[in-house]
Image (spheres, helix red, strand yellow):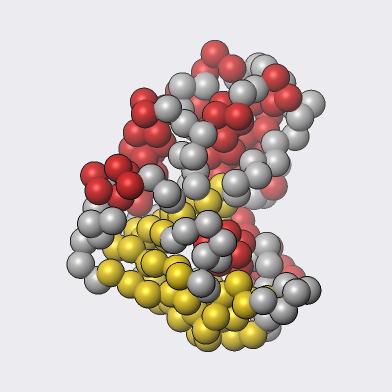
Amino acid sequence: MIHLSSVTKWYHNQVRVLDQVNLDLKKGEFIYVIGGSGAGKTSLLRILATEEAPSQGSISLFGYNLATVSPSTLRAIRQSVGYVPQNVRLIPDLSVFDNVALSLSLAGHRSIRGEAKTRIEEVLGRLHLVQKRDKLANTLSGGEAQRVAIARALVRQPQLIIGDEPTGAQDKENTWSMMDLLMKNNINGATCVIATHDREIVRRVRKRCAVLTAGRLGFEEAMCTY
């Protein structure tokens, strides 16, 4: 499912944000990425989400080397990824419903009807957003906007879910609603890579942990007790 080999990333200042990162994940795995501010978590997740390319090294998703795939194959890969960035990037003058529906349209659904509408309503309900469905995105609070971004990522039932601090703006109730939804998708076969600072989540939903320290990636093979 995911293979990173000696992935290194630097920006214009030549500081190595990621340094010789190796990672292998099978379909259906769930892994936390933890580490302090500036450790490289966001850069790693952006690379996994195909939003950035590594400066060195190689990355394969779904068996395809991203450095050599055709544009059409890359589009198909992206349609199989649900990415929740820290900057949620909603379209401000669209409603909550339409922001989520747009994700299905971009994934190749020519019209939003029937089963797709039911799926959108279900995800909005699970994230306590039904009453906000017709509100414009620019009227939402930060926490609400983050939940819409999660709904947008999950509604098309992606094979790979990547979340960069997806519960960071949530209260406890909404945090656990999100985690329940992520776990449901994982049980149904989705691979999950979740960056988090929330120690309670990691303690209660115990999964494998990848630990980033100054761009270097290490692992806790046993249940993470972070």
Residue 145: name its quadrant: top right
91 relative position to 86: left or right: right
Residue 18 on image: x %, y %? 57, 75
Residue 70 on image: x %, y %? 71, 76
The residue positioned farthest toward the left in the image shown: 222
Residue 141 on image: x %, y %? 61, 23
Looking at the picture, does residue 168 appear above or below residue 93?
below
Residue closer to the observer: 85 or 154: 85
- Tally of marks: 0
Residue closer to the observer: 193 or 19: 19
Residue 149 on image: x %, y %? 59, 38
Please tell me which residue is depicted at 24% across the width and 53% down the height of the picture.
Answer: 206
Please tell me which residue is depicted at 20% across the width and 67% down the height of the picture.
Answer: 222
Examine the rendering and report whether any part of residue 55 can be seen.
Answer: yes
Residue closer to the observer: 185 or 193: 193
96 relative position to 222: left or right: right
Which quadrant does the C terminus fall into?
A: bottom left
Looking at the picture, does residue 219 appear above or below residue 205?
below
41 relative position to 88: left or right: left
Please tell me which residue is depicted at 55% across the width and 66% down the height of the picture.
Answer: 40
Which quadrant does the N terminus fall into?
A: bottom left
Examine the rendering and report whether any part of residue 156 can be seen.
Answer: no
Please tell me which residue is depicted at 67% across the width and 76% down the height of the picture.
Answer: 15
